[in-house]
Amino acid sequence: MKRQILFITLIIAAMPVIQAQTTLKERLEKHVYTLADDSLRGRKAGSTEGLRAANYIVNQWKEIGIASYKEDTYFQSFREKYQNIIGIIPGNDPALKDEYIVVGAHYDHLGFKVENGDTIVYNGADDNASGVATLIELARKLKESQSSLQRSVILIAFDAEEIGLFGSKHFADNPVVPIEKIRLILSVDMVGWHKTSGYVKYAGAGTIKNGDQLLLNEKIIPEGLHVTTQNFEKSLFTATDTEGFAKKKIPTLAVSTGLKSPYHKPEDDAHLIDYDGMALITEHLLNFIQTVSQDANYQASGKLADKHQKDQPKVWFGISAAIGDNFHYYTAGALDGKPTASYGIGLLTQLNMGMFAIRPEVYYEYLQAQHPDGKIKASKVSVPLNLVVQMTERMAGADFFIGGYYSYLFSGKQGNGTLDLTDIFYRNEGGLNYGCGLRVGPLRAGFSVKYGLTNFTRHKNADGAHIRNQATYFTLTYLF
Ligand SMILES: [Zn+2]
């Protein structure tokens, strides 16, 4: 009887050994094939299959022996149907163990669509079964080497990334440890294409003091892996789970092998993934996290990516250049004058109030127009004041504006002579101003129309018409 128990005990004890005999690469492969299988129907956040993916991760962590953040559950539920999955590996240093390194990977993807009766599944093998597989195996390796961890590590599989980074934002707003104790977040998102892209990139190295030195230290880079860094996340069109943390001023690293995979397409499948590359990335992440966990001198740089700066500035200043044309329109009669090249250069300020803004400007304008008695060339100072309606993010925006302007003509010529401002033309002009623009970073390109509402001429012509100016400009503005 005793011998039998011993025998059974031996078999049970040997099971984890058998498990451990599978290679890292094989385990990564298994996770990606499981999560990116058609049966998980694209793991859409809030779906039954999303929950199945969540349970798969929970079961892996349980098997590895990762402690859940709460006594009875790994789930941090939010908005009723979504859940982050959170595990903790405590560090050992009496002081540093109260500080945390967060490693996250989102496990949701886009789901599926039905087209002509066919179900087309977005398997999301690279985005982001690759990151989740890496997170699971990283958890195993960190757990195995737990005795060398000084700071603690929080592992999170984020939900609802694809529909608006909801999981990571929820965690950043409801952290399970004091937020100021989180010293770094790594978001592992799309790491399955190392071979094709030729690199794994850590974007955000500039948020950490000596970030490049830590990440590119040869001693921690396994052979065959090409690591690159980028100081700050830049892309305007992609975001990952670092954002919610960056806005709390926590250093962030976005880890990825780039956008070489069939991004957000049904073709993003498990057989295309580079599992050797993923194994190397897992090793590097392990080494890097251990280094940071042990480094008592580790510090944030205090710098953030522009796209992560929290607030829209209340006031913008800008320098603009305008190029376009102007023509005289006649208040009566069928004919207008011919458009003639005109220019402007000036300064503006914009007072931002969310989606509205007020934009006063002042600029020098060189306005030309064809006239029967000779071409008019006028130097003016113009002062537009516009109401702006805008959609604006830190890094990009679009706007429409409408308002009025006043302009003062201080010198001019007609043909070869001086422009007669005493008897024939007026110096002062007022009118309507409107247009639109697109902004990327500090550069705004716009289109504007200045429509004169006051007469340029003091006397009517033979047809009983006055002349007024109408100018159309393309404008380029640098904002600061
Ligand atoms: Zn993703």
Image: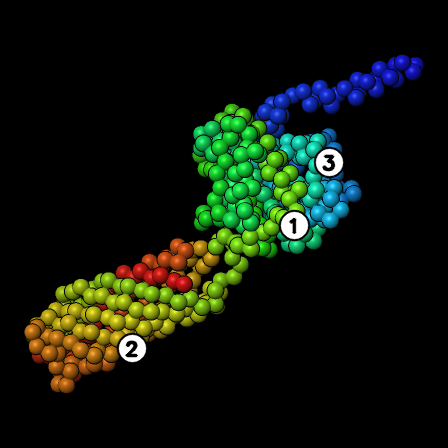
Dot 3 falls on a residue whose secondary structure is: helix
Q: Tell me how far mark 2 sits from mark 1, CA to CA.
A: 55 Å
Three-letter code for the amino acid on which mark 3 is drawn: Ser
Task: Report the side of 303 relative to 140 (left or right).
Answer: left
- Where is residue 133 drawn, in percent x and y? 60, 32
Q: Tell me how far mark 3 sits from mark 2, CA to CA.
A: 74 Å
Residue for point 50% across, 52% down? 305
- Where is residue 192 drawn, in percent x and y? 52, 31
Three-letter code for the amino acid on which mark 1 is drawn: Ile
Residue holding disc 1: 182
Q: Nearer the viewer, mark 2 or mark 1?
A: 1
Could one spot residue 431 in this view of the protein?
no
Residue holding disc 3: 147
Could one spot residue 344 in this view of the protein?
yes
Q: Is residue 133 above or below residue 95?
A: above
Q: Nearer the viewer, mark 3 or mark 2?
A: 3
119 vs 237, nearest the viewer: 237
Q: Could you tell which of marks 2 and 1 lies nearer the N-terminus?
A: 1
> Crowding at label 3, few (<14), some or many (≥20) Cα neighbours within 10 Å?
few
399 vs 315, nearest the viewer: 315
Image quadrant in which the C terminus is located: bottom left
Task: Report the side of 155 relative to 328 (left or right).
Answer: right
Per the rendering, the mark at residue 406 is 2
Residue for point 60% across, 38% down? 288
